[in-house]
Amino acid sequence: QKEVEQDPGPLSVPEGAIVSLNCTYSNSAFQYFMWYRQYSRKGPELLMYTYSSGNKEDGRFTAQVDKSSKYISLFIRDSQPSDSATYLCAMGLNTGFQKLVFGTGTRLLVSP
Amino acid sequence: GAVVSQHPSWVICKSGTSVKIECRSLDFQATTMFWYRQFPKQSLMLMATSNEGSKATYEQGVEKDKFLINHASLTLSTLTVTSAHPEDSSFYICSARDPPGLAGAETQYFGPGTRLLVL
């Protein structure tokens, strides 16, 4: 079993739709949760960062962490064609700086 | 926000040659940088952790003599692929640890990546 599971997609939605992206994980020690967006042939770009459980909102993006279920989500409201990219979840431990563990990424396609 | 650059953005080389990739943190000092490799439609695979002033820590299965890492300053880490072969062709991405006080102690900012093609 992988430490972090993420559906690779692709996930196709029409412009304006609400998008839900998810990751599950097995290591209950993870405390830091991140979402990165990666356009084709580019490096990942940090979108959202959350420590421990709870919600965080930034513009059209909302990140949720449910540590009891070992489940994290990224919601995108009013999706735009420019949101078409691969979204990677990543997680880190709490004991000093540790390497991040990444999901495989979900490819999102938003059609006009 | 924190900016990380990589150079070159792409490189084509002959089999057997060595290729050096640079990773720079432009507006912050990074004591720790990371090198990843990414195959098409796959996630990031951590190769090694690069600490300024000390030897890099390599992940299991990554040949340290093949992938030489040098982190000589707080803003520069280099990855040298020695005696490159076609199977080394990949997308190499570096990241730098966000220093405490910004987005959080455990985040990483990524460079734009270097695409290597070995003929």
Image: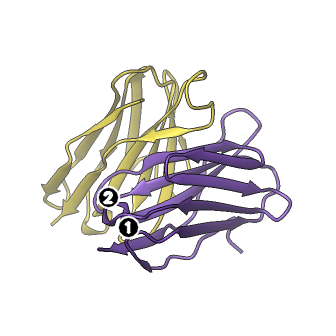
Q: Is residue A99 visible?
A: no
Horizontal and vertical percent position of residue A91: 65, 51
The single residue placed furthest to the right in the displayed view is A68
Q: Mark 2 points at which residue?
A: B91
Camera-nearest residue between A4 and B47: A4
Of the chain colours in the picture, the one used for chain B is yellow
| Shade representing chain A | purple
Chain identifier of the residue bearing label 1 in the image: B
**Across the whole image, how many numbered discs are drawn on residues?**
2
Callout 2 touching callout 1 (CB < 8 Å): yes
Residue B2, quarter of picture: top left
Q: What residue type is labelled 2?
A: Phe
The secondary element bearing badge 1 is classed as loop
Instruction: Identify the mark nearer the N-term, 2 or 1.
Output: 1
Q: Can residue A50 be seen in this view?
A: yes
Question: Does residue B76 sit above or below A54 in this rendering?
Answer: above
Q: At 50% across and 46% down in the image, what residue appears? A: A59
Q: Which residue is drawn at 62% across and 36% down?
A: B106
Along the viewing direction, whichever of B25 and A48 lies nearer the viewer: A48
> Picture coordinates of residue A4 (x, y %)?
66, 65
For mark 1, what is the residue? B39
